[in-house]
Image (cartoon, rainbow, N blue to C red):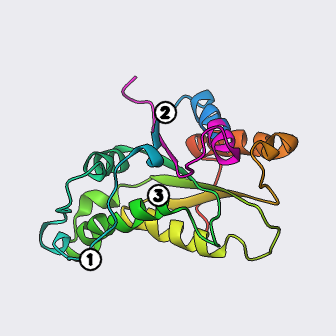
Amino acid sequence: MGDRLAVLGIYGSPRKGGNTELLIEEALRGAEAAGARVERVRLAEMRIIPCRECLSCYRDGNCVIADDMQGLYKRLLEADRIILASPIFFYGITAWAKAMVDRCQALWARRYILKDETLNREGRRGLFISVSGTKGKRSFEGAVLTVRYFFDAFGVAYADDLLVRGIDACGDILKEPEALRRAFDAGKGLVAGGTDPKI
């Protein structure tokens, strides 16, 4: 069991049973089918205070804010694969997801200021899943850029994404069986190594 890859699924939507959750669940099913161990984290159920930009983390790589993010740091660093799922809110990820991302400044400081080589572990990969209520061509640009730098902060390659436009009402994704199939395949491929990091 110790050699099974660890996959951390991060739910960035506050809506249980919604489109984003249905997609990440399929991706995690795919990861499990490929033999991975899966853990789920629902950000809306956690207490994560936004980054204060106090820069205390530049001294030792640790955040001084005592909240649920302290436990999440450990999970982020231990996971071999990370799947972050968030719907688009005003052309970005949700506030719950963004609070987590901003607090990863502490991990960025470890990697880039303090030169902690343990954050350069080879082979770590990430998948981003998102839905947008609109069909605009640029709907995902801001979110994708944010997630790329989130993954990079602690040495995870942005391996793949699943971005689905025109999904708004709760359950709309169930009318898109191809998107659900792609989510399963993306989760499976993330574990099996079937996707190459995107530049």
Secondary-structure class at tag 1: loop
Q: Quadrant of the N terminus?
A: top left
- Direction left: furthest residue: 59
Boundaries of the magenta span: 1-25
The residue to which callout 1 is attached is 53
**How far apart are the alpha carbons under marks 3 and 2?**
21 Å
Q: Residues within 10 Å of mark 2 (few under 14, many from 20)?
A: some
What kind of residue is marked 3?
A: Trp
Residue 27, position in %: x, y? 64, 40
- Which label number is shown at residue 96? 3
Split into 4 quadrants, where in the image is the C terminus?
bottom right
Say whether residue 48 is left or right of residue 173: left
**Place of residue 163 in the rendered image (x, y in percent of width and height, measured from the top left):** 72, 59
Image coords of residue 30 (percent x, y): 65, 34
Res 61 visible? yes
Disc number at residue 38?
A: 2
Q: Amino acid at mark 2?
A: Val
Q: Check if residue 182 falls in the magenta segment.
A: no
**Residue lying at 16% horizontally and 62% vertically, measured from the top left:** 64
Q: Earlier along the polypeptide chain: callout 3 or callout 2?
A: 2
Sooner in the amino-acid sequence: mark 3 or mark 1: 1
Q: Which secondary structure, mark 2?
A: strand
Disc with the residue nearer the chain's start (1 vs 2)? 2
